[in-house]
Amino acid sequence: MTPVTVLGAGSWGTALAIQLARGGRPATLWGHDPRHMASLQAERVNARYLPGVPLPDSLQLSDDLAGAVQDVRDILVVVPSHAFRAVLLAMQPHLRTDARLMWATKGLESGSGKLLHRVVEEVLGETQTMAVVSGPTFAREVAVGLPTALTVASKDADYAHFVAERLHSDTFRAYTSSDVPGVEVGGAVKNVLAIAAGISDGLGFGANARSALITRGLAEIMRLGDALGGQHETFMGLAGLGDLVLTCTDDQSRNRRLGLALGRGNTLEAALADIDQVVEGVQTAREVHDLALSQGVEMPITEQVHAVLYEARAPKEAVHALLTREQKAET
């Protein structure tokens, strides 16, 4: 029954808040927009992001960040990666001395390319108790109670177990891990690869091409993950392969839908306007591309997605560049 505050009232933050509040458990959902939060309070549903899904009676709503965090020990951050540091800085003066932090944000810090646990260490200190929540999850399916499994990673095994137990229900299973960087890399890079898979399908290239992109995309995740201290077992699990397959193959993925639109000839601006939500893979493509260069890691699929998004390369030209690379051994 430990109360938890969720920061971020988008689709994923709302879904996790609903999950945490199931069975009458106490939870609070904070959002930065007072009008949006007033709508949630009046209607008891997040009509913009999760229409038709009622909010549990035990879920409190707030637009007051200080009030939402100051009396709660456990805080779950679910804001876009570009806002992650700003939210940490804003809440830091109001935290309890024994506060514990978890996040379900997937991506790298905008501008620096840092893994998010590094941002937490810089803002809240290296001794901060922390955990990352990631895996193959679509918000609506979690919100309506469809079966789901994901990974909770923390250097503190007891805290990972606590978070997993707090999220647990009859339809929701959380596994624990100690591999924080590996889980973060998997959650970030899969969004870039989902754009690639969407582009391929938008061009009509079929199941063979999609399967090849997923498989070689996993190799890119593993190479970057190795360079950043991740573990191979993580990349073959829920936070690696599981999340990659989900995001590359189902149209609930905003990143895949963006790729589909680009492959069908739409502009980036038009595709983003049509989706009308944050598409993490767009910003992450730039950060992963730069990080791979700095680490000396070969990531050709990521390189071509970056070229389509930021260098005005036509999707067909990007695919041609991938197919005409020098022949090499698979491993």
Image: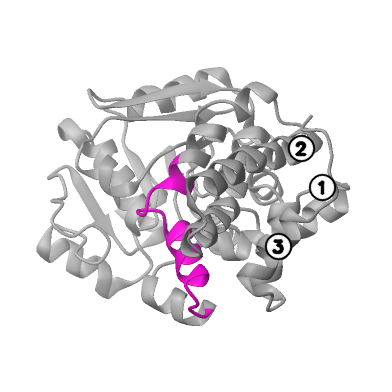
Label 1 Cα neighbours within 10 Å, binned few <14 / some 14-19 / many ≥20: some
The x, y position of residue 230, in whole percent, is 71, 31
Q: Which amino acid does label 1 sit on?
A: Glu
Numbered mark located on residue 320 in the image:
3
Q: Mark 2 points at which residue?
A: 223
Q: Name which of mark 2 and mark 3 comes first in the sequence.
A: 2
Q: Mark 1 points at which residue?
A: 298
Q: Is residue 252 magenta?
A: yes
Foreground residue, 316 or 118? 316
Could you tell me how far apart the alpha carbons at marks 1 and 3 are, in whole angstroms? Answer: 18 Å
- Indicate the quadrant where residue 48 lies: bottom left
With respect to residue 2, does 320 lie above or below? below
Q: Which residue is drawn at 16% across and 31% down?
A: 23
Q: Residue at x 20, y 69 (%)?
A: 38
Could you tell me how far apart the alpha carbons at marks 2 and 1 are, in whole angstroms? Answer: 8 Å
Label 3: element kind: helix
Question: Nearer the viewer's eye, disc 2 or disc 3?
Answer: 3
Could you tell me how far apart the alpha carbons at marks 2 and 3 are, in whole angstroms? Answer: 23 Å
